[in-house]
Amino acid sequence: MHLDNDLFQQLPVPAVQWPSVREGRRDGHARVNPAFSRAFRPGALCSPLPHWTDGAHLTRLPSRTGEPRVCRVTLSTLPNGDRLAVVEDVHAYHLDPLTGLPDRRALLLDAAQPTVSLALIDVDRFKQVNDALGHAAGDRVLEALARLLAGAARAGDLHAYRLGGDEFVLCAPHALTGEDLRPLQVGFRETLGRLGIPSGSFSYGLAQAPQHGDTLHALLQHADTQLTRSKRDRRGGLTTQLGRLLGRVTTAEPSGLNNLSAAL
């Protein structure tokens, strides 16, 4: 079977075709169809990755605007030896629906990229916020933190993800320190102050390669240990103060929740 050029060009989905290998050489360059050219940058998929076999693979491809999109590339070898890749943009399925940040699956997909350090972050006393103000208020707190992390990612060479619940990850190709996170803590505290939760904050654990591990799993484990220790150290005074403040909000008029909605 040979895929006729006219048929290839008319495919409604992005596609790339590589000629068969003859006598150890390729008999031509890869060609892309118009749907691929409209969606992705030139050279976005010059050749199949060496370890790719026929079947579906997840990878990131640069869109026409330069944004790296999560894509499913289905690769097949035609009877004449040509290889055909059909590309499906599945980026939306790898975003957290509440915050819009890349989710855990996107983090695992990106694990192949070099990560020098990461911060594992979660909201202090998030359950108390949920219990006192309701889940809608808790969602808005998570959205506020996500916006701060997304802003930091855009401003620097960083990547932000939501793992689930109130846990987030910030990855960097350079060493992250507590000083790097301090502006985020200040911004988060100010945002929660506008929501009527003036003592709100987040805790974090840091991990750096290679001293804390050379895989994503090892770095996350180390950061989780540091995060647990940090939360334990902070727990004493925060519990009493936050409980008192949240109690004050819930025993007053419902304006506390209204203020939260208005502030966001």
Image: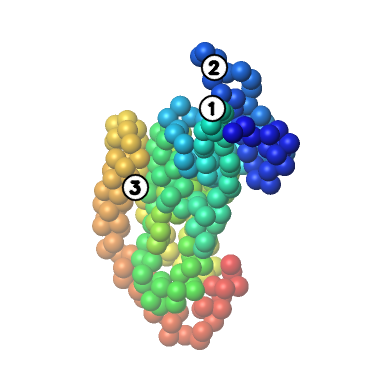
Q: Nearer the viewer, residue 143 or 251?
A: 143
Mark drawn on residue 81: 1
Residue labelled with disc 3: 205
Q: Residues within 10 Å of mark 3 (few under 14, many from 20)?
A: many
Give the image quarter of residue 51.
top left
Q: Is residue 130 left or right of residue 47?
A: left
The type of residue carrying mark 2 is Arg
Report if residue 55 is visible in the image: yes
Q: With respect to residue 37, does 24 lie above or below?
A: above
Tell me the crowding category of disc 2: few under 14, some 14 to 19, or many 20 or more residues within 10 angstroms, Cα based. few
Residue at (33%, 45%) from the top-left corner?
Answer: 220
- Which residue is drawn at the image coordinates 50% and 86% (left, top)? 253
Label 1 – label 2 distance at C-alpha: 9 Å
In space, the residues marked 3 and 1 are separated at their CA atoms by 50 Å
Name the residue type under label 3. Gly
Q: Where is residue 216 shown, x and y percent of the image?
A: 35, 40
Q: Position of residue 123 (x, y in %)?
A: 40, 60
Q: Is residue 189 above or below residue 127?
A: above
- Which residue does the numbered mark 2 point to in the structure image? 22
Labels 1 & 2 near each other (Cβ < 8 A): yes
* Quadrant housing the N terminus: top right
**In this rendering, which labeled residue sits more in front, label 3 or label 1?**
1
Q: Judge by depth and name the residue closer to the eye, 167 or 123.
A: 167
Residue 81, image x, y percentages: 54, 27
Q: Amino acid at mark 1?
A: Gly
Disc with the residue nearer the chain's start (3 vs 1): 1
